[in-house]
Amino acid sequence: MDTSVKRNKKASILSDDPLWYKDAIIYQVHIKSFFDANNDGIGDFPGLLAKLDYIAELGVDAIWLLPFYPSPRRDDGYDIADYRNVHPDYGTISDVKRFITEAHARGIRVITELVINHTSDQHPWFQRARHAKPGSNHRNYYVWSDTDKKYEETRIIFIDTEPSNWTHDPVAGQYYWHRFYSHQPDLNFDNPAVLKEVLSVMRFWLDMGIDGLRLDAVPYLVEREGTNNENLPETHDILKKIRGTCCSRKRTSGRKT
């Protein structure tokens, strides 16, 4: 059978089942270490595309891409500096679009990893926040305090490297909150503008054709004094809003999450 016929046949059987991921065979890929198409020693989207038939032959239902966004890569890409682009070592937005199209043509869905709890300290939002007036909307994209004594009942996750969940920023003159590394300031989901920004980022990738988003570190989205700041009811409320928005977007575009 002609290869193009095989691809079209597989693509035609992608179901509209919103729970397709429940029993899907998912193949996880770290772009930088998968296949290098231009011989620079770093994997890239053209390399992944070159091996797409191989992955299809494994019988997988979806490919799960680990973070590929612009990043200082101090935490292997989980420190995102730009949510709407591709790290230049891995390719371009056009490469991603082509990969999505070719994966779908083979009956394979595409899931991306998205870190919404925190950003890199190099992200423009944080650079803007640290220079913004205290209490302003832009400053409040992140969680700030005049003291490092708030939320003392919260555990430190990386106790081998981080003495505190707070780090003082000399430019802002305040402490900022981070559940992970000090170069990964946490976003402030008590600021409605932050959720609006995050939903816009999700729409950007869903509109490009991405079939699902794996959200990293979501138990830590909200902070409340007197709690351990993990899996709070307010965090679940935010996730419900995210789910509702993403599902609505997918229905409008004719596909499902």
Image (cartoon, rainbow, N blue to C red):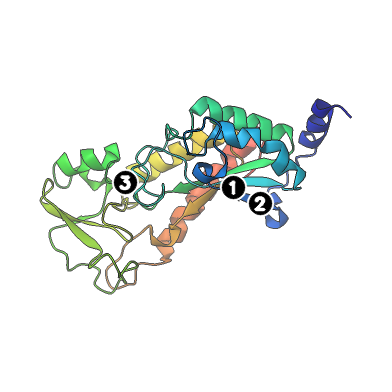
Tags 1 and 2 in contact by the CB under 8 Å rule? yes
Q: Which mark is residue 235?
A: none
In the depicted view, which residue is nearer to us: 11 or 76?
A: 76
Q: Residue at x 13, y 54 (%)?
A: 174
Q: Which residue is mark 2?
A: 26
Query: Which residue in the protein does label 3 denote?
Result: 120
Tag 2 or tag 1, which sits nearer the N-term?
2
Amino acid found under the numbered disc labelled 3:
Ser
Q: Whole-Å distance between the Cαs marked 1 and 3? A: 22 Å
Task: Identify the secondary structure beneath mark 3.
Answer: loop
Is 52 placed above or below 179 here?
A: above
Residue 98 showing in the rendered view: yes
Q: Quadrant of the C terminus?
A: top right
Q: Mark 2 and mark 3 in contact (Cβ < 8 Å)?
A: no
Q: Amino acid at mark 1?
A: Trp
Taking the image as shown, residue 51 lies to the left or right of residue 160, namely: right
Quick check: can you spot residue 132? no
Distance between mark 3 and mark 2 Cα atoms: 28 Å
Tell me which numbered mark, 3 or 2, is placed earlier along the sequence.
2
Q: Secondary structure at mark 2?
A: strand
Estimate the x, y position of residue 90 in percent, counting from the top left.
48, 35
| Side (left or right) of 187 relative to 150 | right
What residue is shown at x 52% (from left), y 30% (from top)? 38
**Neighbourhood count class around disc 1 (C-alpha, 10 Å): few under 14, some 14–19, many 20 upward:** some
User: Mark 1 = which residue?
Assistant: 64
Q: Name the side, left or right, on which 105 lies relative to 72.
A: right
The amino acid at mark 2 is Ile
Q: Is residue 238 above or below residue 257?
A: below
Mark 1 and mark 2: Cα distance apart in space: 7 Å
Badge 1 marks a residue whose secondary structure is strand
Q: Where, quadrant-wise, is the N terminus in this rendering?
A: top right
The x, y position of residue 81, in whole percent, is: 34, 40
